[in-house]
C-alpha cells in the first residue's frame, strides 16, 4: 500500500473510520483515540467490555503527550524513548483529559512506540496515536494474516492495511512505568 493511500486512510480515520492492520506484534483493529463512536464500534465488533482499556500505538512519544499524565510524561521521557529489542507496552497513568473510553478501570493507559513505516505514516497523517487492539473476537484467536482478516472482518472494518507483515509474532512485554514491574515478559 502506497504512502499516498495510507495518508488517505489517515484522513478517513480522522473522520471516524476503523481499520484492520498489522502491528509490531499482531494484526489489530485501530481508529482515532478521540472519536468515541469509532472506539465503541471496535469494542462492539470484538465483544469487548466497555470499561477495558486499550493500547495506543505511535511512531513518536510526542503523540502521546496529551494522553499521558504530565508528571509521568516529563519524568519518564528518556525511559519511554529508549529503543528496545522487542516491542514494549508501558502502562502509564492517563492524562486528566484522556477520554474515559481509552482508560482501564484504574485510570491507566497502555502505550507502545513502534517504528513500522505504515504506522508512522498513519500517525503523521492523523496527528495522533492509533488505537490498537487484537483483531479477534474477545477470547478467540487473533487473525494471523490479511486473508484471515478479509474472511472474518472485511464487512466490519472500513479499511484493511495490506502489503505489510507483522514483523514479530511474539506479544509485547508489558511493564508499569512508575514501578518498572513486568506484568508480561
Image (spheres, grey):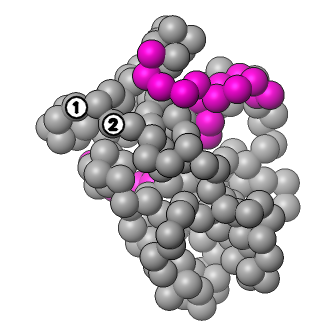
Label 1 CA crowd tier, 10 Å (few <14, some 14–19, many 20+): few
Q: Residue at x 44, y 34 (%)?
A: 21
Question: Which of the image's four quarters has the N terminus?
Answer: top left
Magenta span of residues: 125-147
Residue 88 in the magenta stretch? The answer is no
The outermost residue toward the bottom is 75
User: Residue 169 falls in which quadrant of the image?
Assistant: top right
Q: Is residue 118 above or below residue 129?
A: above
Q: Is residue 150 left or right of residue 117?
A: right
Q: Which sits earlier in the primary sequence, circle 1 or circle 2? A: 1
Q: Residue at point 81% right, 34% down?
A: 49
Return the x and y of residue 23 as percentages of the image width and height: 47, 44
Q: Are marks 1 and 2 in contact (CB under 8 Å)?
A: yes
Task: From the top left corner, tell me how far across and down residue 127 is, in percent.
Answer: 34, 55
The residue beneath circle 2 is: 164
55 over 21 or under it: above or below: below
For the image, the number of numbered tags is 2
- Residue picked out by circle 1: 1
Confirm whether residue 157 shows in the render.
no
In the foreground, 80 or 72: 80
Amino acid at each position: 500500500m502506497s504512502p499516498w493511500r495510507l495518508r488517505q486512510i489517515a484522513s478517513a480515520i480522522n473522520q471516524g473510520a476503523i481499520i484492520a492492520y498489522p502491528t509490531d506484534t499482531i494484526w489489530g483493529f485501530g481508529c482515532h483515540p478521540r472519536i468515541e463512536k469509532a472506539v465503541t464500534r471496535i469494542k462492539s465488533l470484538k465483544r469487548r467490555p466497555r470499561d477495558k482499556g486499550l493500547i495506543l500505538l505511535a511512531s513518536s512519544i510526542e503523540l502521546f503527550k496529551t494522553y499521558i499524565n504530565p508528571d509521568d510524561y516529563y519524568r519518564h521521557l528518556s525511559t519511554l524513548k529508549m529503543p528496545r529489542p522487542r516491542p514494549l507496552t508501558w502502562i502509564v497513568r492517563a492524562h486528566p483529559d484522556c477520554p474515559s473510553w481509552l482508560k482501564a478501570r484504574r485510570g491507566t493507559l497502555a502505550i507502545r512506540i513502534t517504528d513500522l513505516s505504515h504506522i508512522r505514516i498513519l500517525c503523521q497523517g492523523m496527528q495522533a496515536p492509533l488505537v490498537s487492539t487484537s483483531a479477534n473476537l474477545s477470547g478467540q484467536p487473533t487473525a494471523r494474516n490479511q486473508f484471515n482478516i478479509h474472511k472474518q472482518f472485511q464487512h466490519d472494518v472500513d479499511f484493511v492495511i495490506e502489503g505489510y507483515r507483522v514483523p514479530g509474532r511474539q506479544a509485547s512485554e508489558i511493564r508499569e512505568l512508575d514501578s518498572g514491574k513486568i506484568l508480561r515478559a
